[in-house]
Amino acid sequence: MAVIDRHGDIHTHGDTGRRVRIASVSKLFTAWATMIAVEEGTTSLSQPVGQEGCTVRHLLAHAGGYPFDGVNPITSPARKRIYSNTGIELLAAHVGERAGVDFADYLHEAVCDPLGLASTHLEGSAAKDVVSNIHDCARFMAELRRPRLLSRDTVRDMTNVQFPELEGVVPGLGRFDPCPWGLGPEIRGTKAPHWTAPHGSAATWGHFGGTGTFLWVDPVADVACVMLSNREFTEWGMEYWPAFNDAVLAEARATRG
């Protein structure tokens, strides 16, 4: 695991070089690459992708109407927040097509290479199959806090709630109304219970993965944390993560100066 404190110092624990599949934390990497494509003019948030009325913005915000898995939409866009691997995969295919390269190559060229993420590669679905390690994820987390590859206005858009009226389900946690989400990152809002720190800010954003991985940024505390594992979220996530994340924030507050 790694924590970046408000001073930008990185604190690590464990084998920082061990590579694992980071599961749905992959979606943060995919979203970052997609928004680089948007800034470059390769695509746009209003570009149609998938079923009628669905756009890049809908897919990033899990509002495209697609199921968790499966190519057939189950509702029209902007009706419900349906967490969808399919939507992210459609998005990645679209970006790759518009860029003229495989999305895995685009991700490497747009995100991994500029940030020096030598151990990070996409090895399958852009929704769940990025392989990385703590060393690289800490570098990526530093980019999320202080972006160099994207403008601050773009990151502000990504971390503001999209389609704020939508209700939906966070897999493994339950149904929330509303269920806030940004352009890729989940936004904590008033969700309870939640996997992030119970005493963290409502503006906290990030993602967790089914293999027991998570990455979050609390912009109010100016603290970020990433953890990688190969133990399923359902076996331990909600039992330990909220308390641990609270402890991270408490330590950060105690060491201000």
Image (spheres, rainbow, N blue to C red):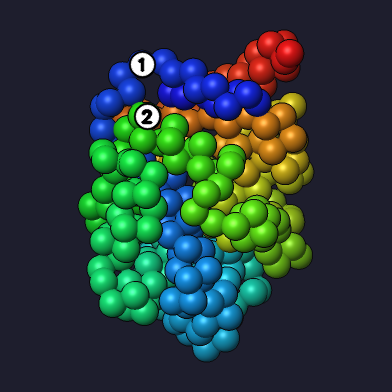
Q: Which residue is mark 1?
A: 14
Classed neighbour count for the residue bearing mark 1: other residues with Cα under 10 Å, few (<14), some (14–19), many (≥20): few
**Distance in Å between CA atoms under marks 1 and 2:** 9 Å
1 or 2: tag closer to the N-terminus: 1
Say whether residue 75 is left or right of residue 252. left
Q: Quadrant of residue 65?
A: bottom right
Q: How many marks?
A: 2
The answer to whether the residue labelled 1 contacts the one labelled 2, judged by CB atoms less than 8 Å apart, is yes
Task: Please report the residue visible at 48 percent of the width from the left and 71 percent of the height from the top.
Answer: 40
Task: Please report the residue visible at 30 percent of the width from the left and 55 percent of the height from the top.
Answer: 108
Provide residue 164's location: percent of width, then percent of height: 74, 62
Q: Which residue is mark 2?
A: 134
Three-letter amino acid code at the position of disc 2: Ile
Three-letter amino acid code at the position of disc 1: Gly
Provide residue 95's location: percent of width, then percent of height: 39, 72
Between 166 and 255, the one lying in front of the other is: 255
Is any part of residue 84 visible from this angle? no
170 relative to 15, above or below: below
The quadrant of the image that shows the N terminus is top left
